[in-house]
Amino acid sequence: MQLRWAGFRRVRRQVCRRIGARMRALGIASTVEYRAYLEHEPAEWPLLDALCHITISRFYRDRALFDTLRDEILPALASGPFDEAARLRCWSAGCASGEEAYTLALIWHFAVAPRAPRVQIEITATDLERPLLARARRACYPRSSLRELPAAWLAAAFETRPEGYCLIEALRADVRFLEQDLRKARPDGRFQLILCRNLAFTYFAPAVQQQVLAHLRESLAPRGILVLGAHERLPPNDDFQPLAPGRPLYRRRPLEPSLPQPGM
């Protein structure tokens, strides 16, 4: 499956419990038997892959990072330049149930848009798990998922309903959700900001990390910003430069000008 077992050190027990439950459901007593079952049942591999997906998400997770986005990164990106329409395009890769993408929308609405009224934000959020995307589109969350949000934002942006705290439609409209596997596909177009946090560069094997890095390189506009998880770092490459030591922020290097052809 091309995953890094070391990346699961904090969630290893959870994954092992899931796999153990799956084995019991199949009547399989040992990992050796399960391995043999996988060899003869190719349809089991996607199920096993899904068991290894770990979702730990809430609004404004990693406060210092989102403060940096609010105070530095988004205002700088909002100043342009833009090719045509003043649209700031952002991609939340591996968005789970939408907390990260909606946090970006909240930061934009309350902290950045008043200073950049001509600029529109457009957030694309992708994940491969349909149940998570369905929850994201509903945009209703328990109070525990919102505990990091400023109280004023919570009061202004959410409605209390029987199913939880539900984001108002005006803010949901800034985000579109797509079913995509980051390892195999990417959204169309270029983005000025990409968040790829606590997924590819934690759990994926080095070869798959390079595949993801190629997708990110193609999707991020020159001088655009890539955001990783707090403890993640990019593998060696020539396309991204760290913004500052110790911070999981990278800038896409500008494209090199084409050299003139002989005789031109």
Image (cartoon, helix red, strand yellow):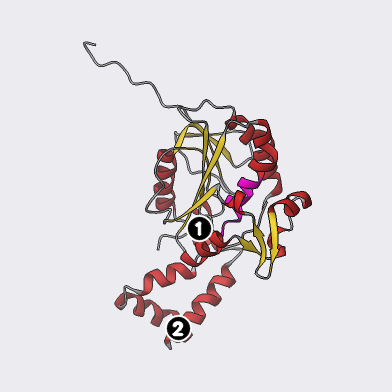
Crowdedness near tag 1: few (<14), some (14–19) or many (≥20) residues, C-alpha within 10 Å: many
Which residue appears farthest toward the bottom when viewing the image? 27
Q: Residue at x 25, y 16 (%)?
A: 261
Q: Residue at x 33, y 73 (%)?
A: 43
Residue type at numbered disc 2: Ser
Q: Is residue 232 magenta?
A: no
- Quadrant housing the N terminus: bottom left
Tell me which segment is drawn in magenta: 97-106
Above or below, 37 relative to 264: below
Q: Residue at x 65, y 42 (%)?
A: 109
Which residue appears farthest toward the top when viewing the image? 263
In the rendered view, does 172 fall on the left or right side of 85?
A: right
Sequence-wise first label, 1 or 2: 2
Majority secondary structure of magenta residues: helix
Of residue 117 and residue 33, the one placed in the foreground of this image is 117
Instruction: Measuring from the top left, give residue 246's x and y in whole percent.
Output: 64, 40
Tell which tag, 1 or 2, sits nearer the viewer.
Answer: 1
The residue tagged with tag 1: helix, strand or loop?
helix
Crowdedness near tag 2: few (<14), some (14–19) or many (≥20) residues, C-alpha within 10 Å: few
Q: Which residue is mark 2?
A: 30
> In the rendering, which numbered label is found on residue 203?
1
In the rendered view, does 233 fall on the left or right side of 220?
A: right
Above or below, 49 relative to 31: above
Residue 149 visible in image:
no
Instruction: Measuring from the top left, give residue 192's x and y in whole percent.
Output: 51, 36
> What's the CA distance linking mark 1 and mark 2?
24 Å
